[in-house]
Image (cartoon, rainbow, N blue to C red):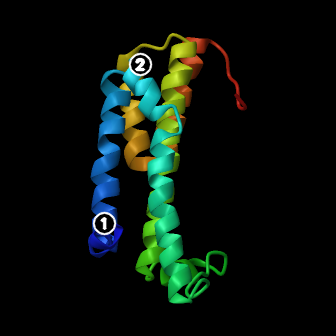
Amino acid sequence: MINNLLPLLTYENIYLVANWGIIPFWILLIFIPNHQLTNFLTQSIVAPLLLAIGYAYLSYLIYHDGNIFDGFELYSGLEGLYSMFANEALLLIFWLHFLAISLFAGSWIVRDSRKYLIPKVVTIPSLILTYFTGPIGLVVYWFFRIFFAKKISFND
């Protein structure tokens, strides 16, 4: 059975499944952030586990091809980063990494907004920005949070 699935596990298919598969988690965070289903799916290990499976599979493919460090030039400058992302497997691994971290940040926004009683309508723009731009959404949320929490905190 697994051998029948392997031809379907192309880089393109993994990319499409990850991109479309993450959207329901974000919809839950935006529209029903305090629901039990949202808590279970977005604030547990479920989403990171699913993305980690793809990450592990891609890592296995890179290892199996025998070129573990081929093109891995993360810290050698922008040109090295560009050449690294020319490798589809590495590009997809980093994309899964981005999806997981962004969802984690969105989940944190929902938990934190609950803690400070920040209205859902205020967190929605931050969640959308976090989905598309990551850190910008977090900073926008932080400014909203200052207003509602009536304190400035850089580390919680």
| Viewer-proximal residue among 12 and 101 | 12
Q: Please report whichever mark, 2 or 1, sits nearer to the chain's N-terminal start.
A: 1
Number of the label disc, if any, that sits on residue 36: 2
Number of the label disc, if any, that sits on residue 123: none
Q: Is residue 113 above or below residue 101?
A: above
Residue occupying the far front of the picture? 1
Q: In the figure, residue 7 lies in which quadrant? A: bottom left
Q: Which percent across, then down, holds residue 40?
A: 45, 28
Residue type, numbered disc 1: Met
Residue located 67% across and 76% down the image: 75
Q: Is residue 36 left or right of residue 152?
A: left
Residue located 45% across and 82% down the image: 87
**In this figure, which residue is indicated by the disc labeled 1?**
1
Query: Which-is-in-front pick, marks 2 and 1?
Result: 1
| Viewer-proximal residue among 89 and 150 | 89
Q: In what quadrant of the picture does the C terminus appear?
A: top right
User: Is residue 88 something one can see in this rendering?
Assistant: yes
Instruction: Using the numbered discs, state the Cα–Cα distance from disc 2 to disc 1 in whole angstroms.
Output: 34 Å
User: Is residue 99 something one can see in this rendering?
Assistant: no
Q: Count how many numbered circles sit on residues in the image.
A: 2
| Viewer-proximal residue among 104 and 81 | 104
How crowded pointer 1 is (Cα within 10 Å; few <14, some 14-19, many 20+) is rated as few
Residue type, numbered disc 2: Gln
Q: Is residue 48 above or below residue 96?
A: above
Q: Is residue 28 above or below residue 86?
A: above
Q: Which percent across, then down, holds residue 139?
A: 54, 37
Q: Which percent across, then down, holds residue 123?
A: 42, 24
Q: In what quadrant of the picture does the N terminus appear?
A: bottom left
